Amino acid sequence: MNQTKKVLARKWNWKVFLLSQIAVILCAGVVSVVTIFLISSIEAELQKASATTVVGIVLSNVLLFETLYITLFIFDPEKLTKTSQFVLVSLVITITFVFSSVVYRYCSPFAMPIQLCAILLCILVGMKTGTISVFNLVFIILVNLVLRGAYLRNDIITITAAVVGNLLSGIAMIYLASKHFTRIKFLLYCLLAGLSCIPYIIVLSISMGIADITLLFNVLWGLFSSAISIVFYFPFVILFEAIFNTTDDFRLDELCRLDQPLLKRLASEAPGTFNHSLVVGNLAESCAIAIGENSRLAKAAAYYHDVGKLKAPIYFIENQSNYNPHDELIPEVSVSMITSHTMFGEILNKQYRLPKAICRISLEHHGTSPVGYFYQKALLLTEGTASKSNFSYQGPKPSSKISAIIMIADTVEAATRAYMPPTKEEFVQRINSLIDEKLNLGQFDECPITMEDLTVIKNTIVNVLPSIHHSRVSYGEAVTVTDESNE
Ligand SMILES: [Fe+2]
Ligand SMILES: [Fe+2]
């Protein structure tokens, strides 16, 4: 049981780290160039900037982006193990900074669209990273625009008020992004959230002795910043989804609608697999919520994890009634029919242009687990000489927490479909043994899931699964072999 006690180490990828450092240097460079050329064009003092000042600006921006990297490393490290995630974060911050500099120069500090960074990153990367990033953006703006430019014009208070006021709207929008509204509702609520900066702008303006028409303009520019953030959000989110092959909650919601072409095919051609996928979706969604993962991605990935069975639905137990084609096949042929569904699932999901994460999960959801039923059958036929590796899935093993969740939910659903233990104690024991079996087989070695996560997942399944199976009664012997009995 030593294996069950080990803490699963987070994967460190040097390629991703180097890519992140390149992003730090490039983005710091862009921010510095904008600061020097755009802002200094209106500042007499900075026009005479020496080489030392330029180097100072560049270095301070490198430090600011490194601070972002370190903050994410401390609070949301998983994002740094994924290719392109930090690049995406840095790019969104840089674009928002450039926009903010332009509106600061030509409109008003109150029009700086800080909210754009907040909503883009919350939707594309996640709430935690979005929140951390928007605070880092504020530091970048303060250091570049306020300390270097505005200080010389003595309007440091105005710009600080503008940045903080719009940050409040951004935080309100981050909260809305976490609520998973429909696109239209999200847009309308974000417009309302833009109002949250008004009291702050009014109070700050009055405290600065502004009580004339300028106050009204400050408020209007504050509202304008929310409006342009929302206007630019849609083209940018589509662009970034395409470039970084990421996806937002709205797209995932659409994919979970049962009228999606691939799900409709699954429902008509493999109804047993379709029902199995819906239950796995319920379980995976609950587990993802319990360990703080993206529950929408978990649900969508579960719905599409077994679409590879469409190639030959009858070879899978949940789609059989009276006829079982495996009765006429040798175990080697049966197992190849079954294990190929992961590879075919990935191909089919790619053909239907599903997000990369979902394609990957459909390939990984069995890892390198043996197909126990046919392995046992082969052992009997060969008098114990059959090789286990010939009766196992080809992998790869799950590479993300959500992939591990799908593997667990899939295994638990298939096993309890075959046999639902009659007492709570037996049921808890069964869930524990199914998950421990996967752990002992090393199926979670390549993903960052922790023992703590696995305990939470076990407890969640114990609480959620009986309500899903509430009308089910036990109708057979326990499956004693690993992985789904006939899959
Ligand atoms: Fe499967
Ligand atoms: Fe499955």
Image (cartoon, grey):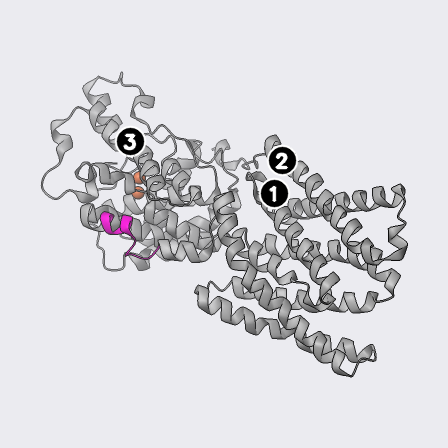
The residue carrying mark 2 has its beta carbon less than 8 Å from ligand 1: no
* Callout 2 amino acid: Leu
Question: What residue would you read off at disc 2?
Answer: 19
Query: Does the magenta-highlighted stretch encompass residue 207?
Result: no
Question: What residue would you read off at disc 1?
Answer: 87
- Residue 210: where, in percent of width, then height? 80, 80
| Residue shown at 76% from the left, 78% from the top | 214
- Residue 170: where, in percent of width, then height? 62, 64
Q: Quadrant of the C terminus?
A: top left
Q: Is residue 177 left or right of residue 371?
A: right
**Residue 191 sits in quarter:** bottom right
Tell me which numbered mark, 3 or 2, is placed earlier along the sequence: 2
Instruction: Select label 1 or label 3 by which is in front.
Output: 1
Instruction: Select label 3 or label 2 by which is in front.
Output: 2
Q: Secondary structure at mark 1?
A: helix
Q: Is residue 435 left or right of residue 155?
A: left
Q: Secondary structure at mark 3?
A: helix
Q: Residues within 10 Å of mark 1 (few under 14, many from 20)?
A: many
Check whether the beta carbons of the residues at disc 1 and disc 3 lie within 8 A of each other.
no
Question: What residue would you read off at disc 3?
Answer: 340
The CA distance from mark 3 to mark 2 is: 34 Å
Q: Secondary structure at mark 2?
A: helix
The CA distance from mark 1 to mark 2 is: 7 Å
Towards the viewer: 376 or 40: 40
| Residue shown at 70% from the left, 58% from the top | 102
Q: Is residue 419 visible?
A: no
Q: Is residue 356 left or right of residue 114?
A: left
Magenta residues (range): 256-266
Tell me which numbered mark, 1 or 2, is placed earlier along the sequence: 2
Query: Does the magenta-highlighted stretch encompass residue 258?
Result: yes
